[in-house]
Image (cartoon, rainbow, N blue to C red):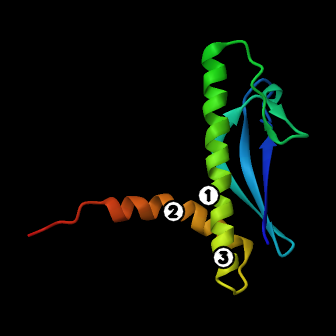
């Protein structure tokens, strides 16, 4: 069974936001999925691996809450992908989880693209 970890990579530039990403580990192979979500180091709880909502600025707090909810949805989607791969009965590499997660949006866009009728 693959494991999912939520990680934070601080910016190399002092005072800038860092990036949240998922680490997928399966068969002793680790792969990363970049989320594109950006937060400051003070907004990340390293031990709980989650966003901290203790910001007093309402706009920033709303953004962090939205990111936290989006991360939960992404984790549920990853869990669903992993469960489907496990049910298929065969072996699968960590890359397959990443592939299914990252191509889902592309496939949704292609399927919903209106077809030309002539």
State which tag comes first along the sequence, 2 or 3. 3
How many labels were placed on the picture? 3
Q: Secondary structure at mark 2?
A: helix
Q: Secondary structure at mark 1?
A: helix
Using the numbered discs, state the Cα–Cα distance from disc 1 to disc 3 in whole angstroms.
12 Å
Q: Would you call the spot at circle 3 few (<14 residues within 10 Å), some (14-19), or many (20 or more)?
A: some
Left or right of 32: which side holds 99?
Answer: left
The circle on residue 77 is: 1
Mark pair 2, 3: CA separation: 15 Å
Name the residue: 33% across, 60% down: 112
Dot 2 and dot 1 residues touching (CB under 8 Å): yes
Callout 3: helix, strand or loop? helix
Q: Is 59 drawn above or below residue 3 in the view shown?
A: above
* Residue position marked by numbered label 3 in the rendering: 85
Q: CA distance from mark 2 to mark 1?
A: 10 Å
Q: Is residue 103 left or right of residue 1?
A: left
Residue 89, quarter of the rendered image: bottom right
Where the C terminus falls, by quadrant? bottom left
Residue shown at 35% from the left, 65% from the top: 111
What percent of the width, then of the height, locates residue 105? 48, 58
Q: For residue 116, what is the image quadrant?
A: bottom left
């Amino acid at each position: 069974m693959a494991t999912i970890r939520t990680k934070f990579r601080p910016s190399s530039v002092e005072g800038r936001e860092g990036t949240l990403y998922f680490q997928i580990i399966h068969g002793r192979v680790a792969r990363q999925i970049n989320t594109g979500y950006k937060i400051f180091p003070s907004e990340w709880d390293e031990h709980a691996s989650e966003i901290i909502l203790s910001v007093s600025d309402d706009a920033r707090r709303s953004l962090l809450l939205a990111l936290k909810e989006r991360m939960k949805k992404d984790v549920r989607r990853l869990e669903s992908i992993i469960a489907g791969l496990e049910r298929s009965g065969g072996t699968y590499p960590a890359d397959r989880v990443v592939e299914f997660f990252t191509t889902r949006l592309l496939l949704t866009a292609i399927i919903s693209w209106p077809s030309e009728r002539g």
